[in-house]
Image: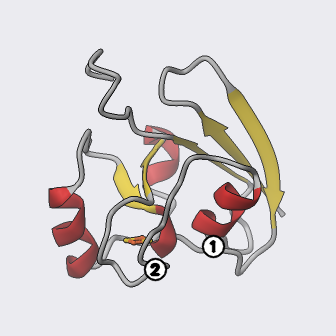
Amino acid sequence: MTLVRFISADGSKVQEVEGAPGERLLDIGQNAGLPLEGTCEGQMACSTCHVIVAAEDFAKLPKASEEEEDMLDLASHVTRHSRLSCQIWLTEGLESLTVRIPGGVHNMQGR
Ligand code: FES
């Protein structure tokens, strides 16, 4: 199992949930009630499932595809560790994964 830790956009709330190998990060987040819209349901056509992966976890994940990179270019609040949560599947051996919800349009703190 993977311990998935979601940090709210302003960093004030941390929510921990467990996920099994093969589960998709987007689904785990949505089931936990996080504000991940995932409008296109994983078609890489919306970027509303954007999350920022903790630096120490980023390298543990398989690299983003070119399509994913292109879509991330269009997302707001993108960082070096941004990913689309619809493209992240938990794997055996991934013990924990920490991601942050990107700041919304109302959060102008630059985080
Ligand atoms: Fe649309 Fe991930 S759900 S890009």
| Residue drawn at the location 56% of the way across and 47% of the way down | 35
Q: Which mark is residue 24?
A: 1
> Where does residue 13 sit, x and y in percent of width and height?
67, 24
Q: Which quadrant, please, contains the C terminus? A: top left
Could you give the CA–CA distance between mark 1 and mark 2, rounded to whole angstroms? 10 Å
Q: Nearer the viewer, mark 1 or mark 2?
A: 2
| Dot 2 crowding, Cα within 10 Å, few <14, some 14–19, many 20+ | some
Q: Which quadrant, please, contains the N terminus? A: bottom right
> Where does residue 6 sit, x and y in percent of width and height?
64, 41
Q: Secondary structure at mark 2?
A: loop
Q: Answer yes or no: disc 2 within 8 Å of ligand 1.
A: yes
Left or right for 110, reference 89: left
The residue that disc 2 covers is 42
Labels 1 and 2 touching (C-beta < 8 A): yes
Ligand 1 quadrant? bottom left
| Dot 1 crowding, Cα within 10 Å, few <14, some 14–19, many 20+ | some
Left or right for 41, reference 111: right
Q: Secondary structure at mark 1?
A: loop
